[in-house]
Image: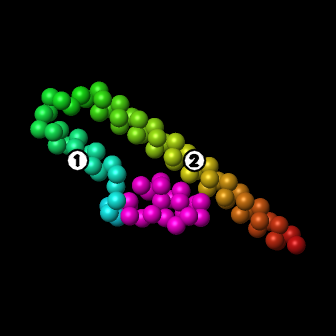
Amino acid sequence: ALVQVCSQCANGETPDISTLLGVKNPESEEHQEGASGGGHPESVDPSKTISQWLSQLGQLRKDVQRLRAHICNKYAEDMGDNMICTTQ
């Protein structure tokens, strides 16, 4: 959620902070179902749970890398704009 809000801010969009406030979180339903186990603890496969976490971690890394690249590009543009103004 934090990466999403930061990306929205960096792109000049209005950030959707409801995910940070816990008002809207599409993953919460999945976590609640997984936590309850549907009353059948034997139905939870640890290898699937681990693979889901690894998949989410991979996606988070990609999101952070995209955000980093965007911030670096924005910083470089701002530095370039500042240098042009000082030389004039």
**Residue of label 1:** 32
Among the two numbered marks 2 and 1 on one chain, the one whose residue lies closer to the N terminus = 1
Q: Quadrant of residue 82?
A: bottom right
| Residue contact at pointers 2 and 1, CB within 8 angstroms | no
Q: Residue at x 52, y 67 (%)?
A: 14
What amino acid is found at the position of numbered circle 2 in the picture? Arg
Give coordinates of residue 35: x percent, y percent.
Answer: 20, 43
Residue 15 in percent (x, y) is at: 49, 64
Q: Give the residue furthest to the right.
A: 88
Foreground mark, 2 or 1, reads 1
> Is 22 situated left or right of 88 in this image?
left
Outermost residue toward the left in this view: 39
Q: CA distance from mark 2 to mark 1?
A: 29 Å
**Label 2: which residue?**
66
Q: Let me know if residue 49 is in the magenta part.
A: no
Q: Main secondary structure of the magenta part?
A: helix
Residue displayed at 46% across by 37% down: 58
| Residue at disc 1, secondary structure | helix
- For residue 19, the mark is none
Magenta stretch: includes residue 12: yes
Dot 2: element: helix
Does 20 sit above or below residue 47?
below
Q: Amino acid at mark 1?
A: Gln
In depth, the one of 47 and 29 nearer the eye is 29
The residues colored magenta run 1-20
Q: Which quadrant holds the N terminus?
A: bottom left
Residue at the image point whose x is 67% and y is 54% from the top = 73
Q: Residues within 10 Å of mark 1 (few under 14, many from 20)?
A: few
The picture places residue 27, in percent across and down from the top left corner, at 33, 49
The quadrant of the picture occupied by the C terminus is: bottom right
